[in-house]
Amino acid sequence: MPSTAVGRAYQQCVACVMDTTDPTISFDDNGVCNHCRNFRTSIAPNWHTDAKGDEQLMSLADQIRKAGRGKEFDCIIGLSGGLDSSFATYVAIERMGLRPLLFHCDAGWNTDQAVGNIERLIDGLNLELYTEVVDWGEMKDLQVAFLRSQIPDQDLVQDAAFFSSLYLFARRHGVKYVLTGSNYSTECCREPDEWGGYTGVDKTLFKDIHAQYGTRPLDTFPLVDILRYKVLYQTVLGMRIVRPLNLVPYIKEDAEEELQSRFGWQRFQHKHHESRFTRFYEDFWLPRKFGFDKRKAHFSSLIMTSQLTREDALSRLTHTEMDEQFLQQEFEYVASKLDLTVDELRAIFEGENKTYRDYKNKRWLIGIGAQVLRNLGVERRLIQ
Ligand SMILES: [Zn+2]
């Protein structure tokens, strides 16, 4: 089980809790990591949640309302029931005065708490929700194929369904602005790609894994390839991503409390616990099979933004979020939900680990594409 890059001594940042399980981490002479440095030099100076941020938020709101005049909705929000997307919805309505189309993709793994939160928010704000349900037979087949592929990126299937169905829906309804809950406050420390965070939907990778391990055709499963999305959706169709949570004070505990007192929204024990699969994957599968604990990045984000002490983070990291008995029950639940026996799932769990490099992929092209678009973006700003 890999815990550090080959030949590298274990080291943990003295300021946050990131460590050498991130194979690309680097440290300065004082033992401070590149994530902390990046926060200090690139994020903090450009992150304004004061009057300046408010001004930007209001001007953005104006722009979105204008573009949506005469239309039923002026933007779309993908709602998971988790804190970030819930609070983004709240900000869009209460502070920006927008008329969002609320979209939820049900990929079969919602926790009751997530469903309850969505219902309370929708009722409390008097909104309508559009829910798209992914064909469970196809979802299951693709998830089992990914598990059999032995790569760490086991949340790609759910992510692809959420992302793709949202963009297909937005396109079908001519919605230009996509509001997301992504934010610096709880996500400024980026999880390294190696921790199962493959960048975007790569249809080449999906097709190869499914060709090798899938058992049935995927007729309806929504898959929008990242390059198609970047070129067609963002560049040609001019779809815009808006991150309102970076323009308002967004303190995790305050936001939870505000949603709770306003709508009866219930806080989760940890980030991403709105999905039963993600909770199992991040609390059990990824740390025990691959040695990666995503909470190190989640906690480090909260440490960098002064919402958690390093000491408290270290103490939380000594144990899993859910207790052992619960995790064993979840192992059985996940197996049975995917039509695997517990022994079959255990055999996969104990199988040899691989990475996306063992399959056809176009990671290199996605890298080049990202660079080209960045350059184009710079050029466009200069021309304007
Ligand atoms: Zn650090």
Image (cartoon, rainbow, N blue to C red):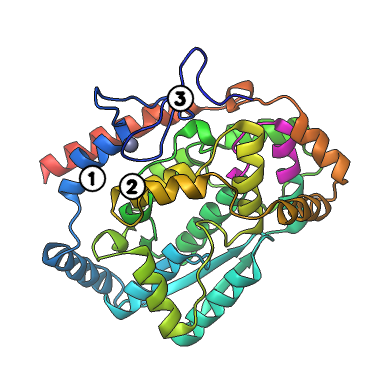
Residue sitting nearer the eye, 63 or 94: 94
Identified at 81% across, 41% down, the residue is: 345
Q: Which residue extends farthest top?
A: 7
Q: Mark 2 points at which residue?
A: 188
Q: Is mark 3 within 8 Å of ligand 1?
A: no
Q: Is residue 89 left or right of residue 349?
A: left
Q: Where is residue 255 in the image (x, y as percent from the top left)?
A: 37, 70
Q: Mark 1 points at which residue?
A: 43
Q: In this view, does 127 lie above or below 232?
A: below
Q: Mark 3 points at which residue?
A: 23
Magenta-colored stretch includes residue 146: yes
Between discs 3 and 2, the one toward the N terminus: 3
SS for callout 2: loop
Q: Is residue 283 left or right of residue 257?
A: right
Kindly identify the amino acid type of the residue bearing the numbered disc 1: Ile
Cα separation, mark 3 vs mark 2, equals 18 Å
Q: Is mark 2 within 8 Å of ligand 1?
A: no
Identified at 45% across, 79% down, the residue is: 260
- Magenta segment boundaries in residue numbering: 143-156
Identified at 45% across, 27% down, the residue is: 20
